Image (tube, rainbow, N blue to C red):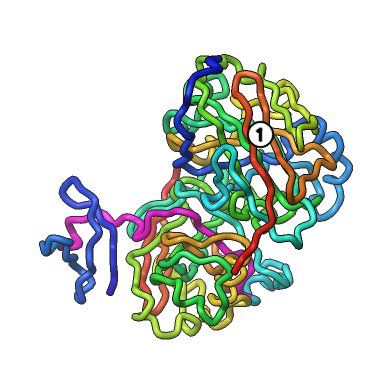
Amino acid sequence: MAGSTTYPPLMIDGTVYGVALNSRSETARLADHFTAPPYKEAPRAPILYIKPRNTHLAHDGTVFIPPAIAAIEPAAAIAVIFGRDTSGVRAADALDHVLGYTLALDLSEPTDSYYRPPIVEKCRDGFLPVGPHLTHARDIGDPASLVVGLEIDGEAAGALPLIELVRSIPQLIADISAFMTFRRGDVLLTGLTPPGARARIGSRISAVAPGLGRLDCTVAAEILA
Amino acid sequence: MKRARIAWQGAIHNARVNDDLASFTLADGRHVPESEVVWLPPVEPRTSFALGLNYADHAAELAFKAPDKPLIFLKGPNTFLGHKGASRCPADVGQMHFECELVVVIGRQGRKIRPEQAYDHVAGYTVANDYALREYLENYYRPNLRVKNRDLCTPLGPWLVDRDDVPDPMALDLRSLVNGELVQSGNTRDMVFDIPTLIAYISDFMTLSPGDMILTGTPQGVRYLKPGDDVVTEIDGVGRLVNRIIGE
């Protein structure tokens, strides 16, 4: 990749959809949990959520959290950016609809519940740093070759080779576009929430992936008038 | 004032609905009859919140107790369509039902909005029919997106009514009709969490911005729909929203 190239800031204009529990290590760890109430049975469809616009934050930004939140749980994710409207595609054709990829830090308050939509946990202002720039799909080829890692204060906190996904990126696009359209500019996130990884006020968090670069953010205390 | 977004003669217009409710005045003063337009959602969706189980009677009907805090989910822009549109019922679905909901449209940005100032941040109101397809319910992030974020399954409109034209949004009769038969009725006073509470609750942890919408939940009344059904969701003083169910 052109390491010395200067890129414009990445602007996300579309809707950002996240996929929870899409790594084999997570589903293996939680398998017993999911046969008990309130879940009763393993998930059938991809487990989706939306990261609304107030959460979007540029590379090298600062996310402010209330001091009452002792820690936040960061996930390092690949962000798939759609290049055209995508509805009812087969997995074999799915990558034709992808413009490119970037990184995301999908931040959340820690919770072990997957029963209700995680709005309070995942939708605070600035809880989705995205960037640093778009890498074109043709420069990546098969996204299963990507490896996304999380760093907290410069220390490796977990890494996910995308070959370890329960549903690959093409399979996710096929399964989700069966009931809803991704529009050009929409984004799909999938990645890893390393168990126990926590960031606190003062932490520096990064998502890294060879080929996509490095996305940083800093956590600071929210001070409201 | 009632404000609509319409498609007319090859362009999209923000139009004022005239008092006859059957014609529009465009920004340039031209008058257009309703018969010539296509209704679009009156608000271009941005962040859209929806409430589950926000009427105690509906929660009881679905065998849930009313939640102790608002049950909120988000909806993408793909799911909205305008008045007199059509929503698809897949062939394998026998449990698609309507949900008539008062929609609050935010007009002024805010964070940590106090309940007593909540209405200062409201632009106006419209009506949504937040269809659900119960076959696709799963116990993960319930109600999950496959139930609530399908393409063109949330009719919205017909228009946006200015806030000050709805003196008490917490005392509005609402109802749904399927093929002319009354199948749901209630009053917004029976919301578990009222509008000021919802605005305060959401803005406590995130910023609300102009164009954000809150779909405030639905009272009791469930009837399963099939292709060909005409569905009306209506709120007194706000509007009467018409949709038709079609097959795939």
Residue drawn at (10%, 62%) of the image: B30
Residue at the (36%, 70%) spot, across then down:
B240
**Which residue type carries mark 1?**
Ala
Q: Can residue B228 be seen? A: yes
Magenta stretch encompasses residue A181:
no
Mark 1 belongs to chain: A
Q: Nearer the viewer, residue B227 or A141?
A: A141
Q: Quadrant of residue A224?
A: bottom right
What percent of the width, then of the height, locates residue B67?
Answer: 71, 70
What x and y, as percent, mark residue B221? 56, 71
Q: Residue B47: within the magenta?
A: yes
x%, y% of residue A140?
A: 57, 16
Magenta residues, start to end: B33-55
In the image: residue B62, left or right of residue B113: right
Residue plotted at (25% across, 59% down): B14
**Mark 1, residue position:** A77
The residue lying toward the viewer, choosing from A123 and B12, is A123
